[in-house]
Amino acid sequence: MQVDLTQAAAIIKRGDVVAIPTETVYGLAADANNEDALKQVYAIKQRPTSNPLIVHIANSEQVLDWASEFSPLAQQLAKAFWPGPLTMVLPAKSEVLDIVRAGEPTVALRVPSHPVAQQLLQILGMGLAAPSANKYTQLSPTTAAHVLSGLGDHVPILDGGACCVGIESTIIYVAGNQWRVLRLGMITAAEIEMVVGFGPELSNQSLPKAPGQHVLHYSPKTPIQLFTSKNALWDYAKTHPDCSMLLIDDEVISLPNKTFYLPNNPATVAERLYDTLHQMDALGTEAILIELPPKTIEWFAIHDRLSRAAYKLN
Ligand code: TXA
Ligand code: MG
């Protein structure tokens, strides 16, 4: 069910949930101070409540409504990357509901840049808890149509077009004057390092657990096979004709049947990856074969999502 901005704001105010666009992926949004609304989010997603939610806020001025500390390092990062696809995990104020942070002493905060998300946050003046608007472990939605097919018609959707970043935000843990990436995204560790002037120094032991970093994640229903060379992919395809294929390349002259192509550019691949996988999944083939992009830093987040999508339990 499609709703407009005013209706979306009213639904959230009365304590229900709405799927909203952000620049990364669509989120399933609810008032981050309303426990019953947040229970609906977990129920619709079929997500365990041990996995906390990101609170979306309109601007950095609202950080201290949620976090007990906004260190100079966190402020510097906010200045450089907000609004945008960076989520910061900061020490939480004691008032932040347990259901938002899954009982952790931290809260994840993000200022989205999508104009529709921004307008909604400004109208409401509250924090919106929003996980990606998909069922637990499934592919994230980057269009209103993906949300509809993944969650069904009973979830109201505020359509803001296709998401331009296309994969989930980079999540970093900021503890005082140190930082560390918890989830890769299109803002790379190298870009963060350029801004702050030093690298990630926190040891594994000092990290909070990032419960959502389940290896099986972002998965279409069709099994995925990854290949490091096109030749290996073609060889496999010869003996497995009922497969669809995704090539990431500079140029492809002609595309065989059931073959998809994305240009050799990380930002474009990120933007179109989930939509392409949604389309390939809908073909219902035996498997989806994907040629991996190069293993360089600007491709790390894509590698992360592809390897999780391809992960098999045995
Ligand atoms: O781009 C995004 O981040 C999208 C859009 C909607 O903003 N949201 C998103 O939410 O991807 P979700 O819930 O699908 O993934 C958020 C991840 C989860 O893996 C969760 O475990 C982690 O963030 N997370 C949330 N709060 C945390 C916290 N306090 N400490 C550690 N990890 C946290
Ligand atoms: Mg998610």
Image (cartoon, rainbow, N blue to C red):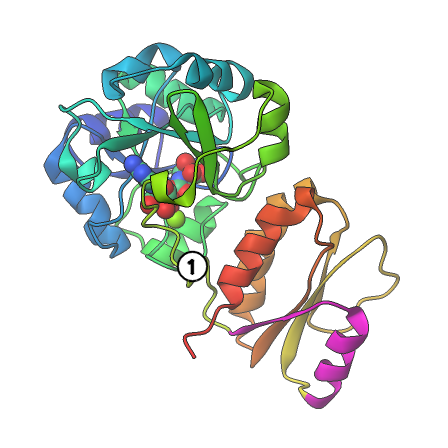
In the picture shown, does residue 101 fall above or below 78? Answer: below
Whether the magenta-drawn stretch holds residue 21 is answered as: no
Q: Position of residue 120 (x, y in %)?
A: 35, 22
Whether the magenta-drawn stretch holds residue 224 is answered as: yes
Q: Nearer the viewer, residue 94 or 168?
A: 94
The answer to whether one can see residue 109 in this image is yes
Q: Nearer the viewer, residue 181 or 80?
A: 181
Q: Residue at x 44, y 34 (%)?
A: 172
Farthest bottom residue?
239
Looking at the image, residue 80 sits to the left or right of residue 72; the answer is: right
Q: Position of residue 20 (x, y in %)?
A: 38, 36
Secondary structure under tag 1 reads loop
Q: Quadrant of the C terminus?
A: bottom left
Q: Position of residue 261 (x, y in %)?
A: 73, 59
The answer to whether one can see residue 187 in this image is no
Looking at the image, residue 222 sits to the left or right of residue 131; the answer is: right
In the picture shown, does residue 97 fall above or below 231? Answer: above
Farthest right residue?
253
Quarter-wise, where is residue 61 in the image? Answer: top left
Looking at the image, residue 22 sits to the left or right of residue 296; the answer is: left
Neighbour tally class for label 1: few under 14, some 14-19, many 20 plus, Cα within 10 Å: many
At label 1, which amino acid type do we have? His
The CB of the residue at mark 1 lies under 8 Å from ligand 2: yes
Residue that label 1 marks: 217
Q: Position of residue 185 (x, y in %)?
A: 54, 41
Q: Residue at x 15, y 44 (%)?
A: 39
Q: Nearer the viewer, residue 233 or 154?
A: 233
Quarter-wise, where is residue 246 in the image? Answer: bottom right
* Magenta region, residue range: 223-239
